[in-house]
Amino acid sequence: MQRLDLKVGFSCNSRCVFCVQGDKRSRVEPRTTAQLLATLEEKRSLCHEVVFTGGEVTLRNDLPSLVRAAVELGYERIQVQTNGRLLSRMELVDGLLDAGVTEFSPALHGANSATHDGLTNARGSFRQTVRGIANLRRRGALVCLNSVIVKQNAGQLAEMARLFVQLDVSQFQFAFVHALGSAGTHFESVVPRYRDIQQQLHQALAIGQAAGVRCMTEAVPLCWMKEWEEFVAERIMPDLALVEPDREVPSYTDYRLRLGKAHGPPCEDCTWSHRCEGPWREYPERFGWEEFVGRRDACP
Ligand code: SF4
């Protein structure tokens, strides 16, 4: 069984400099309630979990009714992926929990407002999302936090991990920026080098591990994760059926492996290559493969 990744539309109240959806908010019409209900019904025989995502899903008034429909159809896990800003209103948190959301995945991209608000282009967004996470935890909700690693926060990953532990999140994930959409447009200013983030990233994971908080990385190849391999999210990611307003991808795992990620010359005799997806292909297309060194240690 797969997880349904249901993109409701691309409207958003933030404007992140690294948004992979780029300018789709102005080009692509959001899906209607009826279309989304039809997709939930149609995909149920293939999928037992659903993630409502966008764009910003909490901007939609029909979100609680869509969640209720997912519950009635028997989806076992129902996740809301959000920038977390509107969750600063407790009545929205309560409404979504009453409807049947089983987990929330809000996003924080900095250890402070200067960094986070600078990246989201939304003044006050750090304060709102932090309050949203506090509201969720006050209600005992499962919080799987997501952070995108970019140049602007590369020096504060450890500090961010300390904040996440302090916020009592259930798990956190650091995803290396995918240089598509706005991140592709702003490549020079947002995409860091793996060699420059490795130390901070391992420190951040050590902080989560010491606090007993589940933590992971995404899109960080295994040559940068020596002795931290168990923290690589791709190892345990479920396959997604992706439904967007403008396209469908029946298996996101297949798409990611065939078209999204890349292997290069250093991977040819790397002992871990069969376990490693490699970087998003846009990274070596811009920086080359010189930075990568195939591993020689035994892969269990
Ligand atoms: S050299 Fe290639 S296959 Fe080996 S760990 Fe690095 S990116 Fe992965």
Image: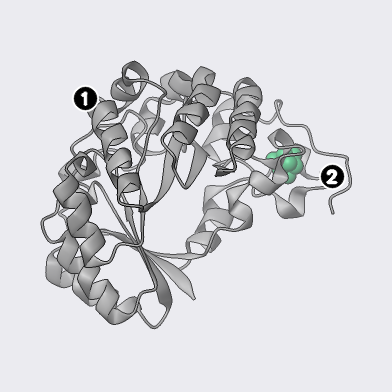
Label 1 belongs to which residue? Answer: 124
Amino acid type for the residue under numbered disc 2:
Asp
Task: Give the vertical position of 269 relative to 116 (above or below).
Answer: below
| Residue 264 visible in image | no
Mark 2 crowdedness (10 Å alpha carbons): few <14, some 14-19, many ≥20: few
Task: Give the vertical position of 133 relative to 31 (above or below).
Answer: above
The residue nearer to you, when weighing 36 against 52, is: 52
Locate residue 237 relative to residue 243 in the image: left or right: right
Total residue callouts = 2
Q: Position of residue 117 (x, y in %)?
A: 29, 23
Q: Quadrant of ligand 1?
A: top right
- What residue is at 19 percent from the left and 42 percent from the top? 86
- What residue is at 80 percent from the left and 37 percent from the top? 294
**Residue 269: mark in rendering:** 2
Locate residue 67 relative to residue 79 in the image: left or right: left
Callout 2 secondary element? loop
Callout 1 secondary element? loop
Task: Give the vertical position of 204 relative to 8 (above or below).
Answer: above
Q: Is mark 1 within 8 Å of ligand 1?
A: no
Task: Give the vertical position of 289 relative to 231 (above or below).
Answer: above
Q: Quadrant of the image for the C terminus?
A: bottom right
Amino acid type for the residue under numbered disc 1:
Gly
